Amino acid sequence: MRSDEPPSDRKSFRVADGLYRMDQTIRVRGRQTGYDATGPYWIVGHIRLLSGRARFLVDGVLIPPPGRSFVMAMPPHSVVSVELIDAKTVNSAAFSRGLLPKNFPNEPIAFPAREFKGIRSIQDVERILRLRTNPVRISRCSRPHPLSERLKEQLGRNFQASTALSTLAKDYRTSLAALSRLFRRDWGKPPVQFRNWLRVMDAFRHLAEKTTVTDTAFDVGFNDLSRFHKQFKSTVGYTPLAIRKRSKNAKYSER
């Protein structure tokens, strides 16, 4: 498979106005740590652990998921880390920047999947949330430092902006080095990498529409197209065009 070809098991598409879905299969050899940050989005996903082992990193402690078939619900500005060991997972996640569905939790949780039939509407999301039982808290950090929490939410709301982090640190009356240390301790990435992560994740929404790769890069906050390609591929493992071709809504002839 060439580097510009999409994986056969990853695709993103719009399922309703303002509601998007990403389906993918993840295969891990050895031990790897997965990462997810929602920014302004909420996410509800079904994860099936077909083989291997998975554990959430919560306040520095690894905890098992609630079974091998479970749902993750993450409100806006959530961060979750999961350790995968020789694992294969099949995932289907819906995400949106719209209003929170009814009964949405105020912190990221996982709970056993019951009669999961896919997500095609907000009503499907609300039905899944109504069926939740025995939820497990899965936030990477439940007691963050106030400054790192403030920065996380500010970057989540304004990740398209190119505001210098040193300017934000000055606004917070601290040094950039101290702010970066706190942020990485609580959320697992330096602020610059976190902002780029949010930009790449937002790019999936644009690529699921009829937006060209070039327009997507600038819409999500990258001022340099080559930097967008490099950052996207290093984060996702495939080029933006490869992912775009998997979208059911995209015009494949556009580049």
Image (spheres, helix red, strand yellow):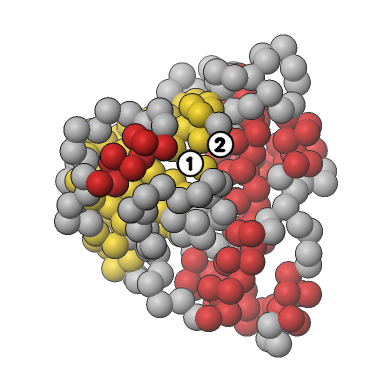
- In the image, taking residue 168 as reference, residue 42 lies left or right, namely left
Q: Which mark is residue 95?
A: 1
The answer to whether one can see residue 174 in this image is: yes
> How many labels were placed on the picture?
2
- First in residue order: circle 1 vs circle 2: 2
Instruction: Give the residue at x 41% y 53%.
Output: 74
Of the 4 image quadrants, the one containing the C terminus is top right
Q: In the image, residue 16 lies at what x, y percent?
A: 51, 29
Q: In the image, residue 205 lies at what x, y percent?
A: 60, 36
Q: Is residue 61 above or below residue 209?
A: below
- In the image, taking residue 126 as reference, residue 2 lies left or right, namely right
At mark 1, the secondary structure is strand
Q: Amino acid at mark 1?
A: Phe
Q: Which mark is residue 17?
A: none
Q: Which residue is mark 2?
A: 18
Q: Amino acid at mark 2?
A: Gly
> Mark 1 Cα within 10 Å, few/some/many (few <14, many 20+)?
many
* Rendering quarter of residue 26: top left
Instruction: Give the residue at x 64% y 27%.
Output: 209
The answer to whether one can see residue 64 in this image is: no
At mark 2, the secondary structure is loop
- In the image, taking residue 132 as reference, residue 82 lies left or right, namely right
Q: Nearer the viewer, residue 171 or 90?
A: 171
